[in-house]
Amino acid sequence: YDTGYYELIGVVSHKGRTADGGHYVGWVKHKKADRKETKEDQWILFDDEDVTFENWSNMVGLSIDLQGGKADTQIAYINIYRKVTVKPEGQALGSAAEADKK
């Protein structure tokens, strides 16, 4: 069923003082934190030919700071979300019982 929640799964950000002069990069969530092996969400940064893995704390921390506020800070321009749904207990998503509800 629909939870009304959305999960951030991608970001396009820009670093530079103007839209004409600067650099756009893309971020995609790679692995969600499970609080056991993975303590925080892991993301992939696509920066031209460079592809690197980053932890969430690095994305919003002082080294990158997607929140903006300084002249040369990266600012998130496009955020991509995925709808969070939960299957009713005892039913698989796409089951006949679920189809009957529609």
Image: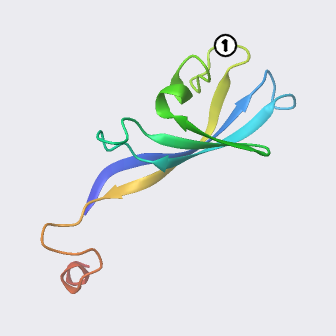
Residue named by callout 1: 70
* Mark 1 surroundings: few (<14), some (14-19) or many (≥20) residues within 10 A: few
Q: Which residue lies at the image location 55% right of the left edge and 29% below the top edge?
A: 59
- Colouring style: rainbow
Question: Looking at the figure, which quarter contains the C terminus?
Answer: bottom left
Amino acid beneath label 1: Lys
Q: Name above or below for residue 11 compared with residue 71.
A: below
Q: Which residue lies at the image location 58% right of the left edge and 22% below the top edge?
A: 65
Q: Position of residue 64 (x, y in %)?
A: 62, 24
Q: Is residue 79 visible?
A: no
Q: Nearer the viewer, residue 52 or 16?
A: 52
Q: Position of residue 19 (x, y in %)?
A: 81, 31
Displayed quadrant of residue 73: top right
Q: As drawn, which residue projects farthest toward the front?
A: 37
Q: Which residue lies at the image location 73% right of the left edge and 17% below the top edge?
A: 72
Q: Name above or below for residue 60 compared with residue 93.
A: above
SS of the residue at dot 1?
loop
Q: Name above or below for residue 53 compared with residue 57.
A: below
| Side (left or right) of 80 relative to 85 | right
Q: As drawn, which residue projects farthest toward the right?
A: 20
Q: As drawn, which residue projects farthest toward the left?
A: 90
Q: Nearer the viewer, residue 64 or 50?
A: 50
Q: Position of residue 1 (x, y in %)?
A: 25, 63
Q: Position of residue 20 (x, y in %)?
A: 87, 31
Q: Name above or below for residue 61 compared with residue 82.
A: above
Displayed quadrant of residue 91: bottom left
Q: As drawn, which residue projects farthest toward the top?
A: 70
Q: Is residue 24 visible?
A: yes
| Label total for image | 1
Q: Which residue lies at the image location 86% right of the left edge and 28% below the top edge?
A: 21
